[in-house]
Amino acid sequence: MRKIQILMSVYNGEKYLETQIKSILSQDCERKNIAKVTLLIRDDGSSDNTHEILNKYSKLYPDSIRWYKGENIGVINSFFDLVEHSDEVDYYAFSDQDDYWLPDKLSEEVKKVVKREDMTTSEEPILYGCRPKLVDVNLNEIKSEIKIPVVQTGFGNALIENVITGCTAIINNKLKKIIMNYLPKYTVMHDWWFYIVATYCGHVIYDENSYILYRQHGNNVLGSATKYGSELRKRIFSWKKDCTKASRQAKAFMDVLEFNKLKTQKNNFELLKEFVNGKSSIKLRFKLALNKNLYRQRKIDNIMFKILILFNIY
């Protein structure tokens, strides 16, 4: 049977942690003989009752759950540390401390990754992600009036937008090894880095189905807007806050490529060079603004970002 390890980073997670662990223990992956599941947890310097909860479940399920304590290094570095300390298995999934996984999450997701692997003759780096279902603190679905487009993945999208929510992600062993050789000096989020690396040298599976209840509350990282007016305000704020992070992250990716050559399609590397060098060339910025291979998922986002590129605000 294949093996999958779930990597979870926690910080002061006592409020929702038990619910999340129980949902992981309820996965039907092993019962369906799809994959054996283990859970590796890193505590990022909690000061609440998180340790007591982790001790309780690691003692109850010693063959399935293991945890270790680390210094407070933040969510990004905590997940990279988990990848570094992970076991040698076929697949790796990533978990937040406050969500709820539906029982068939892992089984359905692993099946799709295996299907892709069976289609290819060589060992291919693969990243899987799906659309999370937004819920409130009591796990009730949050209805939205906003129409969400079907996701089209690609390296030109990964440079300026992340569509992979980390708690839905699965990577295969090949991609894990590449990630460990291409650790960034800077990235916006670990899942965005996964998306960049996978679109550059491998394959991304994006599943429009939802297998996770993605809890929205005041303390989690990603908020949501469900009405057009509130979403527009949120997106404008996001553009102002994050407009310069994409080029910095792309430069970090180019820097690691200088030390480790990574096979890719030629047009991916050319696009990366133009995106990074466009900061100092108005000619390249016009070229980028007209390049259909550099895109965001929504038309309005795409137009706005191309305008920002022209004004060298990216």
Image: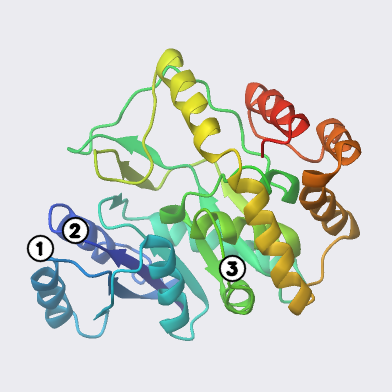
Q: Which residue is nearer to you in this view: 72 or 313?
A: 313
SS for callout 1: loop
Q: Is residue 59 left or right of residue 75?
A: left
Which residue is depicted at the point 88% across and 41% down? 284
Under mark 1, the amino acid is Asp
**Image quadrant of residue 294?**
top right
Q: Which quadrant would residue 160 be assigned to in this image?
A: top right
Mark 1 / mark 2, whichever is N-terminal: 2
The residue tagged 1 is 48
Please tell me which residue is depicted at 36% across the width and 72% down the height of the picture.
Answer: 30
Relative depth, front residue between 255 and 201 = 255
Which quadrant of the figure contains the C terminus? top right
The Cα atoms of the two marked residues, 3 and 1, are separated by 31 Å
Residue 253 location in percent, x, y?
68, 63
Amino acid under label 2? Gly
Residue labelled with disc 2: 13
Residue for badge 3 = 184
Q: Is residue 42 left or right of residue 126?
A: left
Q: Of residues 278 and 305, which is closer to you in this image? A: 278
Residue visible at 25% across and 85% down?
63
**Disc 3 residue type?**
Pro
3 and 2 marks in contact (CB < 8 Å): no
